[in-house]
Amino acid sequence: SLQGLEGIRSLGLSAPSEEQWASIHIANNPHLRTVEGLAGLQDDLPSALVIWNNAKLSSLHGLEGIRSLGKMMKSKWVGYSLYIGGNDRLRNLTELKGVHGDLPGSITIENNPSLRSLRGLEHVRSAGRNQMFGRSIKICGNTELQSLDGLAGLRGNQSGSVEVVGNDKLTNLKGLEGIESLNADFGGSGLVIMGNSMLQSLEPVSKIRLVDDESLLITSQYNATIQAPRCPGGWFWQRGTLRCQFCGHNSV
């Protein structure tokens, strides 16, 4: 446990901003079950929050007092505001409901096999772009995830791309409809929807546009049937219309 840290109320910068690591980095603790020891935190974090590879951690209770996040400028998570990955028993993110507004860095939620919901992030309005891939939001490999409605607070333009990949029980993209535009990542993709075996519709993202008209907005195959039975299900953005990348049909 993290008992003994209850008296911490706030965290400052540990280095100049251009060399800043995460404000909170909890990683590789195979026996950690709770972060309740951080319940005294009632402040904005000047850098990122990283919760990574804690096999027995089932909730984020103790983080309710965090109000906003900065971004990390050091290590492999450069440009991230929030990274939650590889936590086998983590079921939800509801304890992050205090985090709000525009995050300066990106959000990645990946490889949490028990995670069912993203609720707790609904007060986040936008995410910045990480310097590794050019992404703003990545939701990947959460095999029990059933909904993106925790992202329903997203509005307007996102600085980078959005990627939703390999979430086996995700049936729809509700929660992304508030996004109006995206910037392409460093690979030229604005939106990647791939490998979600139960996904039935692209409708919530059909009106998203790219800031750079020359960049591709991609939703790839390996999803379930996407309401266009003549098409293999791979799509790209072309002059304001989402089209099948194989035959040119418009999405429906």
Image: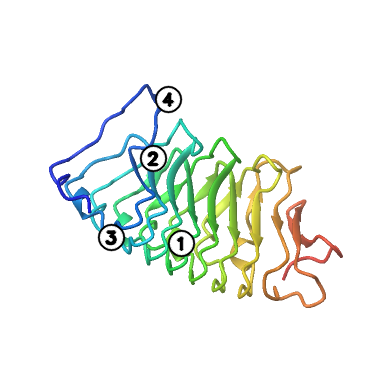
Q: Residues within 10 Å of mark 2 (few under 14, many from 20)?
A: many
Label whose residue precedes the other's in the sequence (2 or 4): 4
Tell me which amino acid carries mark 1.
Asn
Above-or-below relation of 242 to 5:
below
Label whose residue precedes the other's in the sequence (1 or 2): 2
Give the image location of residue 241, x and y in percent: 74, 58
For marks 1 and 2, give the one nearer the viewer: 1
Pointer 1: what residue? 112
Pointer 4: what residue? 19
Q: Residue at x 25, y 35 (%)?
A: 11
C-alpha span from label 1 to label 3: 15 Å
For marks 1 and 3, give the one nearer the viewer: 3
Pointer 2: what residue? 48
Label whose residue precedes the other's in the sequence (3 or 4): 4
Q: 32 or 39: nearer the eye?
A: 32
Give the image location of residue 165, x and y in percent: 60, 60
Label whose residue precedes the other's in the sequence (1 or 4): 4
C-alpha span from label 2 to label 4: 12 Å
For marks 3 and 4, give the one nearer the viewer: 3
Give the image location of residue 182, x and y in percent: 61, 47
Q: Residue at x 72, y 61 (%)?
A: 220
C-alpha span from label 3 to label 4: 30 Å
Scheme of image coloration: rainbow
Q: 213 or 29: nearer the eye?
A: 29
C-alpha span from label 3 to label 2: 21 Å
